[in-house]
Amino acid sequence: MSPVLQISALALLGTTALRLVASGEYLRFVKPSLAPWLLLTGVALVALGAAVTWYLWRAADDASSHAHGGPRIGLLLLLPVAVVYVVAPPPLGSYAAERTAAREPTQVAAPSTVLPLPEPDADGYRATSLDEYTARPFWNIEPSYEGEPVRLTGFVTPRAEGGWYLTRIQIACCAADGFPIKVFVRDTGPVPPRDSWVRVDGRGLATVSPEYEEDDALGEVLAERVVPIEEPASPYEDQPGL
Amino acid sequence: MADDSAGGRTATLAEAAGAAAPEVPDVQATGVLDAVEAAPPATAWYRGEVVHTWLPIALFLALIAFRDSLQPLLSGPAISTWFAIFVSICIQALPFLGLGVLVSAVITAYVPTSWLTRAIPSRPVFAVPAASAAGAVLPGCECGSVPIAGGLISRGVAPAAALAFLLSAPAINPIVLISTAVAFPGRPEFVWARLIASFTVAVVVGLAWTAFARPEWLRLRPRPHLQGASSRPRTFVLTAQHDFVHAGGFLVFGAMTAATLNVLIPRAVLDTLAGQALVALLTLAVLAVVLAICSEADAFIAASLAVFGPRAQLAFMVVGPAVDVKLIALQAGTFGRGFALRFAPFTFVVAVVVASLVAAVLL
């Protein structure tokens, strides 16, 4: 790996880190709290590339000899950069959701205690995360969403036997540790396209039927309206408590 | 160590090839300017320039130019998942790697060599635990600790102590422990278990080396080193550059392997393997060797393997920094193949046993 290529790799990686944060695309890979560290690292890598260039320049002045290679394994540093620019991978979707086991929802309050529901929004719906929605029945936290107007967002994971799950991937740090939260949508309309993002306005249900539980679903919701939406800026739900 | 490298010894090509190296430098710091002593013939230089610079750059630009035609080919659900997981591991690890490289470069350039050797007692029975503890204050990836251990041995530190340091430095330094705490939110017992288990492994392996090893098992190979490093800032910059490119390359390789396993291994197989305690333990221990994740990032991978249970997760984090495929390669290169063939399997067994015992008590 030649010096020029090493410097290019440092500069490209640094600028890629900066670009990912500036465009918000980093949220497809890691959690929001990493942003300042990514920015620092990006700046540091560009500075390092500049410093190496400086010393290389000076060495070229005082010696006619030519510097050669660093470790060839370093070529791999160009790969994530290429993937970000060429592939621009979408966030984890239904494929990952079907292949990964669900976990317990986050314990948002001590079991069997009271935690007020979120206030209704302008349309009269209580907007909440799939994690919080499923945590209440799981940890037996009062009051429940039973019969309440709720507003949930996620992507569509079709169910093999018919119907579909409103799904969100929750991450602790990065997409590699992501796991799905699935809520079965009781809906009379057609199944929306796989991996499309939707908002479900409807009534809360406090239990899950066993056939959906087998698919690792943690909740059910009675849909009044399923509205297609754009992919949210932050496609993953953050695991609280970090 | 900066004093040594700043001495401006002009090594000949024969030295670099290992024929008559008078002394092995304490820290391998081969930057872009290493081997300036050997100017190759002009044509070879030209060919090297094409192969090592312009060919990769042309390939890279071609990829970007044809991205619109390539994208449909690279957009299936499995391959998209692979890309997303691959990039996310790289991005997540980037700040951790950067911090580790920064600190190791500061230590290389600005901390005097002698402080560690002075701090470590000469008798192995005391030196091994002391060296293991010293590892806790030296952040860095395992790739960085191999050359440091080689340098320590060449400067007269007992090999057992240097090897204990080699095992503990990447496993229990503050960055690793902090990232473990972040990866296992609300479960500090994982941090303690990791600290205790990895420290114990370093001490046990170090003492066993004192008791049983023969000197001829370990053969230090002379390494190319930083040439004509005239100043500390220059040593700092070139060390950081080399370490980042080297460790970063291995990190990307680990991310590729992890993403591949994540996508390829059917959930049913993992669930089956995860279902039986002993199989789960050995599966993750072997996975740690094969994945070769940087110790500063491996806690995040371990956290995602919760289905295997805490004992196997701990084994993953204890084995990983001590034995993995890239470490075995680095050790064979630094200490000789005979060393790596003995050291790696022994360390693996000790790490698995110690991790199981600690997990039984703490997790």
Image (cartoon, coloured by chain):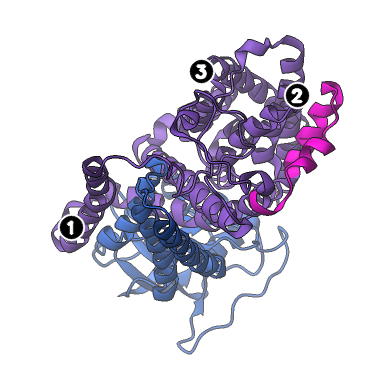
Chain colours: A blue, B purple
Mark 2 vs 1: CB contact within 8 A:
no
Q: Where does residue B322 sit, x and y in percent of width and height? A: 61, 30
Q: Chain of mark 2?
A: B
Disc 1 element: helix
Circle 2 residue: B158
**What separation in Å lies between label 2 and label 1 (alpha carbons)?**
52 Å
Image coordinates for residue B231, horizontal then vertical, percent? 61, 57
| Foreground of the two, A87 or B187 | A87
Which one is earlier in the sequence, the residue at label 1 or at label 3?
1
Q: Amino acid at mark 1?
A: Ala
Q: Is residue B123 left or right of residue A90?
A: right
Residue that carries the numbered disc 3 in the rendered image? B337
B231 or B160, nearer to the observer: B231
| Of the two numbered discs 1 and 3 in the rendering, the one whose residue sits closer to the viewer | 3
Q: Mark 3: which amino acid?
A: Arg
Residue A199 vs B71, above or below: the answer is below
Residue A198 drawn above or below residue B168: below
* Chain letter belonging to callout 3: B
- What kind of secondary structure does the magenta stretch mostly adopt? helix
Name the kind of residue labelled 2 in the image: Ala
Quick one: B224 or B172, which is closer to the camera?
B224
Q: Which mark is residue B62?
A: 1
Q: Is residue A182 among the parts visible in the rendering?
A: no
User: Where's the N terminus of chain A, which quadrant?
Assistant: top left
In magenta segment, residue B165: no
Magenta-tinted stretch:
B108-136
The percent coordinates of residue B121 (x first, y second) are: 86, 30
User: Which marked residue is nearer to the observer: mark 2 or mark 1?
Assistant: 2
